[in-house]
Image (spheres, rainbow, N blue to C red):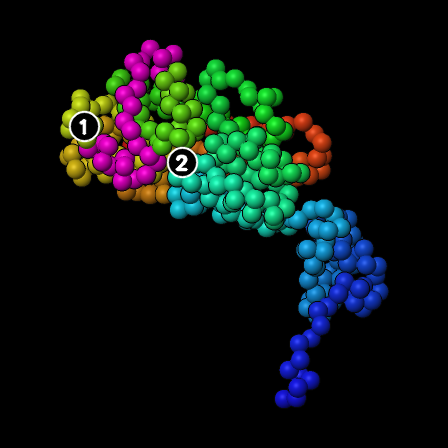
């Protein structure tokens, strides 16, 4: 093999593709954007020639021209948790289909975020930021993100005031929990449950606080006493330990409403394997999220469902709407919840 064969080949350019396909440079650019209009046969020709020449668009160069990086930053409290990992997977897939790449950033254990990490995020110049943790406030992100308008997943509690006007510009996905929780309490009440415990999540989580307040309000309107709060942290192990302590030391409960499905799994296993109680005959259990594992026969969990596909589609719509209209006031999408009835209530 000669030295000439060993020499690296120069990278193909859009101009080379355009010349071979006998089209304009603009047409080459449009062929790689699925949202632009271009005759199918012309797009197919350009993409075929680009593949032959081993040409791929230079994202950095396109970003300089268009002002868009095609990067979406995502801020999460953790990556290993079942709901978060499933949502990140689905969201990344949907964003890649729209031509975006994702950057993942993780908060501290108290759900705050280091300013050096925020500066790093800004250095990537993301087109949008999705904050799954409301503790990283819009006022904080506004100091670092510049043109990128953040999106928050918001769980409004009954009677809560809307603070979006007083905060810097941000978009929101509102998840209404009332219907799903009301359906769950109605089902428990219908089976005779009156003493209901709430297995909580981490106290720093606004989603946990909103969920607890919604449950309290639903139970009050249905003439039930307030739920007994059992402290958890969203994890299986904490839920298991808390359930054992609660039933051995306290008076127990007719039912446990868990802040999430993983917590509900811990409750069920503690009741069955540590306390010798039957689910649902002795204690009824309801979860929240409807993660993929909830229908597994070992748990067969009754749970309040977030529709994952609907959530992901709504988030993608917010991103595209904001990019199409950067000066628009705060955008919002709203989703509801509903109860999925399985075998842990009955």
Earlier residue among tags 2 and 1: 2
Q: Nearer the viewer, residue 67 or 16?
A: 67
Report which residue position mark 2 lands on.
Answer: 110
Density class for disc 2 (Cα within 10 Å; few <14, some 14-19, many ≥20) is: few
Instruction: Give the residue displayed 63% in from the left and 35% down from the top.
Output: 149
**Highlighted range, magenta:** 218-244
Q: Quadrant of residue 236?
A: top left
Q: If the image is split into quadrants, where does the N terminus sit?
A: bottom right
- Residue at left offset 40%, top offset 25%: 209
Image quadrant where one finds the C terminus:
top left
* Residue at 33%, 34% in the rendered image: 233
Give the residue at x 66% y 88%. 2
Indicate which disc residue 247 carries: 1
Find out whether residue 209 is within the magenta segment: no
Q: Crowdedness of circle 1 by 10 Å Cα count: few (<14), some, many (20+)? A: some
Q: Which residue is the extreme one toward the front?
A: 116
Judged from the image, the secondary structure of the residue bearing numbered disc 2 is loop
Q: Secondary structure at mark 1?
A: helix
Question: Disc 2 versus disc 1: distance between alpha carbons?
Answer: 29 Å
- State the image coordinates of residue 147 (x, y, percent, origin top left): 67, 38
């Amino acid at each position: 093999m000669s030295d000439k064969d060993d020499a690296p080949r120069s990278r193909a350019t859009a101009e080379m593709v355009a010349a071979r396909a006998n089209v304009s440079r603009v047409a080459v650019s449009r062929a790689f954007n699925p949202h632009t209009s271009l005759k199918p046969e012309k797009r197919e020709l350009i993409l075929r020639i680009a593949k032959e020449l081993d040409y791929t668009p230079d994202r950095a160069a396109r970003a300089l021209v268009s002002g868009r990086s095609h990067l979406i930053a995502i801020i999460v409290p953790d990556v290993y948790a079942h709901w978060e990992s499933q949502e990140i997977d689905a969201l990344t897939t949907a964003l890649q289909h729209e031509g975006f790449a994702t950057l993942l950033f993780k908060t501290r254990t108290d759900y705050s975020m280091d300013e050096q990490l925020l500066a790093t995020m800004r250095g990537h110049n993301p087109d949008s930021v999705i904050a799954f943790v409301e503790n990283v406030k819009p006022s904080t992100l506004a100091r670092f993100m510049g043109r990128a308008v953040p999106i928050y997943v918001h769980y409004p509690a009954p009677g809560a005031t809307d603070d979006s006007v007083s905060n810097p510009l941000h978009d929101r996905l509102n998840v209404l929990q009332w219907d799903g929780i009301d359906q769950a309490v109605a089902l428990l009440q219908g089976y005779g449950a009156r003493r209901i415990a709430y297995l909580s999540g981490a106290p720093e989580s606004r989603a946990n606080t909103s969920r607890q307040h919604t449950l309290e309000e639903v139970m009050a309107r249905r003439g039930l006493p307030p739920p007994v709060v059992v402290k958890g942290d969203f994890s299986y192990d904490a839920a298991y330990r808390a359930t054992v302590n609660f039933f051995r030391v306290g008076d127990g409960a007719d039912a446990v409403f868990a802040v999430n499905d993983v917590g509900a799994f811990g409750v069920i296993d503690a009741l069955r394997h540590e306390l010798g109680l039957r689910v649902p005959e002795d204690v009824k259990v309801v979860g929240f999220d409807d993660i993929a594992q909830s229908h597994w026969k070992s748990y067969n969990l009754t749970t309040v469902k977030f529709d994952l596909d609907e959530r992901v589609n709504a988030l993608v719509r917010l991103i595209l709407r904001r990019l199409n209209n950067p000066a628009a006031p705060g955008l919002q999408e709203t989703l509801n919840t509903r109860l999925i009835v399985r075998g842990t209530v009955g």
